[in-house]
Structure formats: C-alpha cells, structure tokens
Image (cartoon, coloured by chain):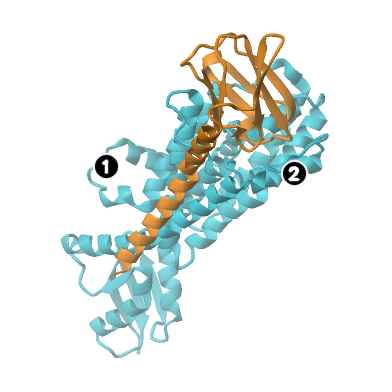
Amino acid sequence: MNKTISIIITLALVVGIGIIFFGSFKSENNSNASTDGITTNSEIKNNIQYITINARGGYSPKVSMAKSGIPTKLIIKTNGTFDCSASLVIRSLGFRKILAQTGEEVIDIGIPKIGQPLQGICSMGMYNFLVKFI
Amino acid sequence: MSQKYTFHVSGTHCASCKILIEDILNEQELVKNVQVNLERKTVDIETDNNQSISEIAQVLTDKIKANGYSLSVEKIISRSSIPTETERNNNVLWRAIPIGFMFLVLFFLLQKSGILNLGIGGKITPVTSFIIGLIASVSSCLAIVGGLVLSLSAKMSQDSKNDTKPFLLFHMGRLVSFAILGGVLGLVGSAIGINFIFTSLLGIFASLVMLILGLNLVGIFSKNKITLHSGIFQNLTSFFKKIEHKTLTPILIGFGTFFLPCGFTQSMQVIALSSGSFISGAFIMFAFALGTLPMLAFLSFGSTSFAHSKHAPLFFKSAGIVVIGFGIFAFLGGLAGLGIINPLFNI
C-alpha cells in the first residue's frame, strides 16, 4: 500500500518536472505560430539585418525568425545579467564568451542560409535560443 | 545480578549505526551496558533482567526496529537475511523517492519562476558580489556545486564517524582559493581567459561523480556487492574512502569549485578580471564565495547532523535521489554546452 502511494506521488512529481523542463517549448511554438513567423526582434538597417536577443535568466525570444541571404548581425543584450545566460556559446560560429553584465554584444554571423538555424546555448546548457532563417 | 548476552544484529550499514544503536539501547531500563561490534555484527548487552535471552532480543528489537535494525540470538544465515535487508532497504527507498523528487521539483520550480533573475546593475562592490553569491547559491549552480557538496558530504558521513574537519577544510579552502584566484585575475587582467572547454569538462566530471555517489547513496551498488567487487565503482568508492580523510583533498575540492561551470562564478571572474588590482579582484571573489557559504555550509553540516539522527537511512537515500537528479541535469547540460548533444531542455 505504502509502495502504491509512493509510486503515485513520484509519477505526479515526474510529470511536474516534465512540465518544468519541456513545457516552455510548447508555449513558445504557439506564440510563434500566432504571429505567423513575423517576429519583431529583427530589423534591417543599411542592408544589414540585426537580430536582438535579450539574455537574462535565459534568452528571449527563445525561437525567432529572420531573413536569409543578407548580411546579418546578432545583438545579445545583457542587463544586470550574472546567470548562465551571460556565458554564451554559439558553436556554429566558434563563439564562446562571457558577456559583460550590462551591455550589447554584436556578433557578425555573415550571410545566413535557409535551413541552417543558428543555435546559442549557455555554457551549462540549460538555456538556449534558436534563430531560424526563412 | 547482572548477566552478559551477545546478540547478532542485522541492518548495520554504516559507522554511525553503532552510535545510534548504543544510544537507543542505553536509554532502555533493562540495559545496563551496551557495546556494538560492527565488524562481527554483534551487540553485547549487560542486563540484570531475568527474562530469557530470546525475550530480551525481542524486546530490544522492538526498540530499534523503526530504524531498520534487529537483534537475534542465532546468527541469521546470510541467505535468509538478504531478502529482509533488501525489503527494509526498499521500504526506505519507496519513501525516499518521493521526498527526493519533491526537492527536485521545488528546486526547478524556483529556477523557472524567475525570482532569481533580478538584474543587478551598477558597479560591483564586495557587498553586491556577496548578494550575487547568495542568489547563486540557490540558482542552477546549486545543481552542480551544491550537488557535489551534498553528495560528498553525505557519502563521507555515511562512511565515517562524526568528523566535520573535512567540511571545515573544504569551506576554508573554497573561501581562500576564491580570494587568491580572484586576486590573480585582477592582477593579470585580461591576459588570460577562462577556458570554456576546460570548465565544461570539469563540470561533466563533477556530474559523473555525483551520479556515482548518488547511486551509491541510494544503495544501488551495495545490493550487488559481489558482481561489482572488482568493478571500477568499487575501486572508486575505496578511492574516495582513502582520500576523504586527507587534509589536502577537501581543500583541493574547494579550490576546484572555482572552475566548475556556473554562470554566476564565471561572471564574477570576468568582473574580477577587469577590476584592475589584486586587492579588488580578491575582495570581489571572496565576498562572492562568502555569499554562497550559508547554503553550502547548510548542505555539508546538515548532512552530518542528519547522518547521525535516526532518519539517517532515509536521508541518505533521499539525498541520493536529489544528487542523481542534479547529476543528470548537469551532465546533459554539460554535453549540450559542449555541443555533443542538442539541448534537451530549456528551463
């Protein structure tokens, strides 16, 4: 009997952990779907596309869309950021840096191609962001 | 007239069991003197009670049964003792699993809640770095630094008697090495960078240590001692037993925590790096380490006090579950950070 109760509680807690870890993906996808892939975190100035991502307690937006085929720069904004999101790794660019606590880090990502999303991750691996190019 | 009896005891799994059994039995009126021999698994009891030896065994077993021990006149043959011990282990385990998971859920909820993401702007003084240390000590860094401290402390308390010296040495070593290394960073300036790959690999190593110690605390390994007798885990366990009482080891582990992957520590290192002088770099890192001290001290000294209470078996197993959870989290995160696997989660 004891065992059954224990199993039930454990299962409930496992589901809880599952929601904590994976729940965010769902809401992120939904919000993206509702905006039809048009995100407000990228703008084009002087033929250069700038994508802005905020880093503090994770990255936001976690998934963003941007245009392919034009020179693009990524702006990572920190604002009193001390957590893991300040230590950023973008493997495809060979970028590894601990960002300044408050400021903007401009990273040149060249001319992105369709179907080659850019993924950034914090060094401990629990925060990440993805930029998809369309 | 007092008489001496020797009983066989089952369920003794750690050095502190001796203290616990002696404490409980000494409280009993009919016991005048009690002596536990862990190696022979016997309990010598001096009593002036006239009950028969088997009745005394029964009466005393009732007192210590709740803690998982039992006395018998005849030595229980190992074959029949295996299921009872496993059964007792399982009962504690079934209580420990939900407790461990509860802590994990609370911990990750705290991370998810965003309470810890308060931005601290302006110039970093030792006071702000102390506050950042306080926040860091309950942040996701707890999963790796705290998990390591908890697993090592629990394992050490399980193996040894009441000995807080290694913990004191660990915390001293941590504080002093943070100050010195912070000072060095301030002195050297931007000439050296903190190597990402090195910290990630160290983090993965730490998470593997946590996984092994966690499984050990839960009791996975102790169940099949025979099959693992010459395995690497056995070697590793004996390795830990050998090194854990050396003075240098806890200090070195304290020193090593400087390099463990933790966003907060790394941020503070960058600040120390740009602080410009040995003194200011040292103060910033020292204050940060001091901020993390309350939580880490609670984990290590809490482990020892729990380890000597009657809830010891439950504590070890619950701690084991928590440590395994942290270990998996840190391991998968570390692999993702190195780019070996895709990130599996985003908290």
Q: Quadrant of residue B313?
A: bottom left
Label 1, residues with CA under 10 Å away: few <14, some 14-19, many ≥20: few
Q: Nearer the viewer, residue B260 or B305?
A: B260
Q: Which residue is mark 2?
A: B130
Left or right: B53, with B274 as reference point: left
Q: Residue at x 54, y 38 (%)?
A: B249
Q: What residue do we see at 23% from left, 46% from top?
A: B226
Query: Residue type at mark 2?
Result: Phe
Residue B308, above or below B47: above
Residue identified by numbered label 1: B229
- Check whether the beta carbons of the residues at disc 1 and disc 2 lie within 8 A of each other: no
Give coordinates of residue A95: x percent, y percent.
59, 17
Q: Secondary structure at mark 2?
A: helix
Q: Give the drawing colour for chain B.
A: cyan
Q: What color does chain A have in the rendering?
A: orange
Q: Position of residue B293 (x, y in %)?
A: 66, 48
Whole-percent x, y for residue B256 in the image: 58, 33
For mark 2, name the chain.
B
| CA distance for labels 1 and 2 | 46 Å
Residue type pointed to by label 1: His
Residue B143 in view here: yes
The answer to whether B104 appears left or right of A101 in the picture is left
Q: Residues within 10 Å of mark 2 (few under 14, many from 20)?
A: many
| Quadrant showing the N terminus of chain B | bottom left
Quarter of the image where one finds residue A12: bottom left
Q: Chain of mark 1?
A: B
Q: Depth check: give the residue in front, A28 or A10.
A: A28
Q: Who's the residue at 51% across and 43% down the image?
A: B148
- Is B141 positioned to the left or the right of B311 in the image? right
Looking at the image, tell me whether mark 1 or mark 2 is earlier in sequence order. 2
In the rendered image of this protein, does residue B79 appear above or below residue B140?
below
